[in-house]
Amino acid sequence: MTDFNKTNASHAKSAFIITYGCQMNEADSEKLMGQLEKCGYISARALEEADLILINTCCVRESAEQKIYGKIGECKRLKTLNPKLIVVITGCMAQKNREQLLKRAPHIDLILGTNNVHGLIEAIKKIEQTHEKVVAVFDQTETFDNVPVKRGSDLNAWVPIMYGCNNFCTYCIVPYVRGRERSRLPQDILTEITELGKKGFKEIMLLGQNVNSYGKDTALGLDFAGLLAEIDESNAVERIRYMTSHPRDMTKQVIDVIAKSRHICEHFHLPIQSGSDEILHRMNRGYNQESYRKIVHYIRKVLPHASLTTDLIVGFPGETEELFQETLDFVSEIKFDAAYTFLYSKRSGTPAATMEDQVPETIKKERLHRLMERQNEISLAINKKLEGQVVEVLAEGPSKNDDQTFTGRTRTNKIVLWHKDDDDKAGQFVHVMIEKAQTWVLKGNKQP
Ligand code: SAH
Ligand code: SF4
Ligand code: F3S
């Protein structure tokens, strides 16, 4: 997780960044902080102490937007206390709602769109000189190379391999706020990863809204499978992860490369969204139960110990009790290690927002509850099988809630907790015997 907000000194200007949304936003925030450092800002310890507050926003669901409007409101109060405070709004909501933001929150000094991440230095200089509002929201730019990055961790790093999304799933706002797919050049990606390895990073997460379509927008002839193989062969870092894979575009080649590789983790995050063919069709996902099942069977054939996680949306327009039941049954059949479950949220401008048969909120919530209960039972049953086994863990640091406990993750992305001792250090690979498995975490003892 990105954690810039650590240090402070009374003489320097300081900035506080709040990041909402997905990993792509986390990665953008690291580029935004990198640029703020170039403008002379250091990380503020607290929101109240900052000379500049940057809110990197998400608009994937309405709940996210409401929370963010609350935070923007809080900045208004802080600005009355400190009129010199600079308030910056970036990210997907900035891209989508710039007019509304300006009207609703005149205390905002700078609105920077998702295609303007590299334009922060110029915009800040302008504000500091003229004290005038700046709005920079482009429809499309290429990629953001050569932007200074202030990494939030020195263990695992985000590495975007492509920007944007061409899929237009009917519920989703992302293609409207992130633009069309643009792949980074393989040599730029490899150079970045090699440097990360030299600096001691142990794990990288390759990022894209649909990593499986990497390279399709270029004439380079290198696809995602090829890119993964090259990164693996470079031996630059110990662990390679990636997200997100679209089940429609997942290929046997990619799975084969992962099976043969040394460094690519055996964790597949394949968002299914629904287990009903009818709903999947209405969502424009481009796969069905049968094709999804085939991928999962192939993964389990070549990598029997791989983990599989997913995203699910309940209450998509037209989801009847019967169709929801199909999702429940499919979840029971596939047996995901974990699922991130969401209530369908209407996003205006998307095709699903105007579809008939919107599902009432109470029914959505009740279905979400049933789905989570079913999934939790499955997650627990899968994790229980690990009791008594020794797993390899990359140690990440003391637990946030309990400093006597150390935490890390397996290659399959399971969180493991163990009793901390003096030798425990972030970045080490340790072996832990699992004593007690729970739904979301595994507890165990470190092996000598
Ligand atoms: N590109 C990725 C992730 C996109 S957003 C992918 O395709 O998987 C992350 C998750 O948010 C999605 O997988 C989906 O489950 C959820 N999501 C997107 N739009 C949503 C909406 N309008 N309402 C509820 N959940 C949504
Ligand atoms: Fe949204 Fe679909 Fe693109 Fe994912 S693949 S970002 S869900 S449109
Ligand atoms: Fe949210 Fe934008 Fe990511 S809408 S989920 S921050 S791409």
Image (tube, grey):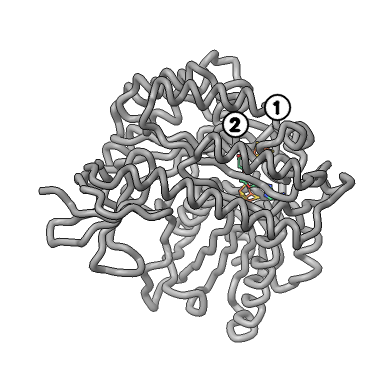
47 in relation to 223, above or below: below
Residue sitting at 20 percent across and 45 percent down? 431
Please count the marks in the image: 2
446 in relation to 14, above or below: above
Q: Which amino acid does label 2 sit on?
A: His
Q: Where is residue 150 in the image (x, y as percent from the top left)?
A: 42, 52
Q: Circle 1 is placed at which residue position? A: 286
Instruction: Decide which of 246, 174 is in the foreground and name it.
Output: 246
Q: Which amino acid does label 1 sit on?
A: Gly
What is the quadrant of residue 264 in the picture?
A: top left
Residue sitting at 82 percent across and 44 percent down? 318
Q: CB at mark 2 closer than 8 A to ligand 2? A: yes
Q: Circle 2 is placed at which residue position? A: 246
Crowding at mark 2 (Cα within 10 Å: few <14, some 14-19, many 20+): many
Q: Position of residue 274 (x, y in %)?
A: 67, 39
What is the quadrant of residue 200 in the picture?
A: top left
Q: What element carries label 1?
A: loop
Check if mark 1's residue and mark 2's residue have beta carbons within 8 Å.
yes
Q: Whole-Å distance between the Cαs marked 1 and 2?
A: 9 Å
Residue sitting at 65 percent across and 55 percent down? 368
Relative to 108, 339 lies left or right: left
Q: Residue furthest bottom?
A: 81
Q: Where is residue 18 in the image (x, y as percent from the top left)?
A: 54, 64
Residue sitting at 62 percent across and 75 percent down? 75
Q: CB at mark 1 closer than 8 A to ligand 2? A: no
